């Protein structure tokens, strides 16, 4: 394997982000292939007995076993780290593997964390059901309110965790303010950046310590594989996360890593085009529905913060219809082009009813606390012509009298 320019930190550090997305992390074999290779291997062989001994002792770089390292996965990790502006990155088997890895690797029995309550459903299941079984306490707060973060701090608080914008309410958390508060108390801050990606928002630049990803979403971008990633300082990734990961095994497959590597090459283009489409569809819907929660529209109550913090306002937003679950389901059933799907970040426009799908495992009380109403729909806008999307929505809105 040859290091290409994509592996040379002195070269890549001067590249802009779009260049890093296409070339960052590329290694080349002796064949000189232009596209990154897929190394479907679980193990590695060595020329002599001293080599694995040196690698296991950490005295020599090199692969030993694909639970810990694999060339295709390493290329993806290097590329994501470069795009994120992070010292290091570790890929994970899924987004939830990434979120769980951060929490379990960082926290011990007796520790406490604070989580923004408007989080991804399974994330709340981990904080509310799994962590308490191991003696880790968690306080949910309204992530928009800095006083609630402050008030939740205890002497044993070790981690702040939030998503921004949050799924599906589009609550935006002030990354700089919350991270600064955490730093003053020796607390680590982790941002689940799945809705934005580095093309739309770069949390480390605003003071966050850790960025966790569902690469399943916009990074792959074409709805093909599950993948996750955790980015941070070399000390955190290699010292805290890696011992957990190499011994418990939430490892990404080389094939999935390769798919995401190829997805990243078009991330900037897709992010720009999908954000523009989402804005157009958002303007159209705003005139038709009683409520819309869209980070790109002036009606979003946190517009000033969004302008400060986000490069682009994203491709995902939510809106409400009168008539609760029945009307929301009727609207979905009337769509002909837009797919009913709880996935997001695809080139295909997808729409879901969070209360009966992604957030159905939560109690009605937790859903109400998070602001997930029965009439809420969440849409992830893709790359189709927005005129076709608006025609489809127009027809469906009429069937529910809007
Ligand atoms: C999808 C998603 C996850 C989980 O990712 P998976 O790859 O499905 O496990 C976590 N956080 C957010 C914000 C997501 O959208």
Image (cartoon, helix red, strand yellow):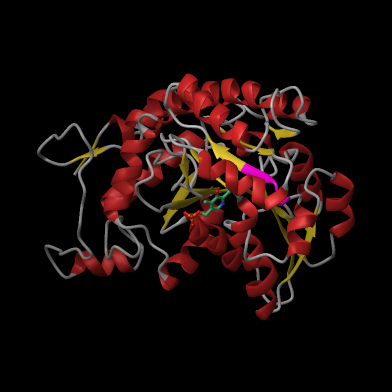
Q: Residue 82 appears in which quarter of the rendering? A: top left
Q: Foreground: 314 or 21?
A: 314
User: In x, y percent, where is residue 37?
Assistant: 20, 43
Of the 4 image quadrants, the one containing the N terminus is top left
Can residue 310 be seen at all in this image of the molecule? yes
Which stretch is magenta? 373-377
Can residue 192 be seen at all in this image of the molecule? no
Specify whether 171 is left or right of 384. right
At horizontal 75% and vertical 29% (from top left) the residue drawn is 300
At horizontal 60% and vertical 23% (from top left) the residue drawn is 279
User: In x, y percent, where is residue 50?
Assistant: 20, 68
User: In x, y percent, where is residue 260?
Assistant: 35, 43
> Is 374 within the magenta?
yes
Q: Foreground: 397 or 210?
A: 397
Q: Foreground: 279 or 228?
A: 279
At horizontal 79% and vertical 39% (from top left) the residue drawn is 177
Query: What is the magenta segment's predominant secondary structure?
Result: loop
User: In x, y percent, where is residue 75?
Assistant: 32, 44
> Is 239 within the magenta?
no
Specify whether 166 is left or right of 181. left
Q: Foreground: 264 or 47?
A: 264
Give the answer, above or below, for where 98 lies relative to 195. below
Of the 4 image quadrants, the one containing the C terminus is top right
At horizontal 73% and vertical 46% (from top left) the residue drawn is 323
Q: How many marks?
A: 0
Give the answer, above or below, for where 4 lies relative to 70. above
């Amino acid at each position: 394997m040859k290091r290409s320019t994509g592996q040379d930190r002195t070269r890549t550090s001067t590249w802009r982000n779009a260049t890093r997305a296409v070339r960052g992390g590329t290694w080349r074999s002796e064949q000189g292939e232009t596209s990154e290779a897929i190394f479907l291997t679980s193990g590695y062989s060595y020329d002599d007995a001293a080599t694995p001994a040196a690698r296991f002792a950490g005295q020599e770089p090199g692969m030993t076993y694909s639970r810990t390292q694999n060339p295709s996965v390493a290329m993806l990790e290097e590329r994501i780290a470069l795009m994120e502006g992070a010292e290091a990155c570790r890929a994970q088997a899924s987004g939830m593997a990434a979120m769980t890895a951060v929490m379990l690797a960082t926290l011990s029995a007796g520790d406490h964390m604070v989580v923004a309550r408007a989080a991804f459903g399974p994330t709340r299941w981990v904080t509310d059901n799994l962590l308490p079984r191991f003696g880790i306490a968690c306080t949910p707060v309204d992530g928009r309110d800095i006083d609630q973060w402050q008030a939740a701090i205890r002497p044993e608080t070790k981690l702040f965790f939030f998503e921004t914008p949050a799924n599906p309410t589009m609550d935006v958390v002030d990354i700089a303010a919350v991270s600064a508060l955490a730093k003053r108390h020796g607390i680590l801050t982790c941002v689940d950046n799945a809705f934005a990606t580095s093309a739309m928002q770069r949390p480390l630049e605003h003071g966050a310590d850790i960025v966790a990803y569902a690469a399943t979403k916009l990074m792959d971008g074409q709805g093909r594989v599950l993948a996750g990633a955790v980015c941070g300082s070399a000390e955190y990734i290699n010292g805290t996360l890696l011992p957990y990961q190499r011994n418990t095994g939430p490892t990404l497959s080389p094939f999935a890593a390769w798919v995401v590597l190829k997805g990243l090459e078009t991330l900037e283009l897709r992010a720009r085009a999908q954000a523009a489409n989402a804005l157009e569809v958002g303007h159209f819907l705003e005139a038709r529905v009683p409520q819309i929660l869209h980070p790109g529209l002036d009606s979003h109550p946190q517009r000033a913060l969004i302008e400060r913090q986000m490069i682009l306002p994203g491709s995902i937003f939510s809106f409400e219809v009168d008539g609760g679950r029945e009307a929301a389901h009727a609207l979905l059933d009337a769509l002909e082009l837009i797919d009913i799907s709880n996935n997001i970040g695809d080139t295909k426009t997808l729409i879901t009813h969070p209360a009966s799908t992604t957030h159905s495992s939560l109690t009605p009380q937790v859903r109400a606390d998070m602001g997930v109403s029965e009439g809420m729909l969440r849409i992830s806008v893709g790359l189709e012509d927005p005129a076709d999307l608006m025609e489809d929505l127009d027809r469906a809105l009429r069937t529910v009298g809007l």
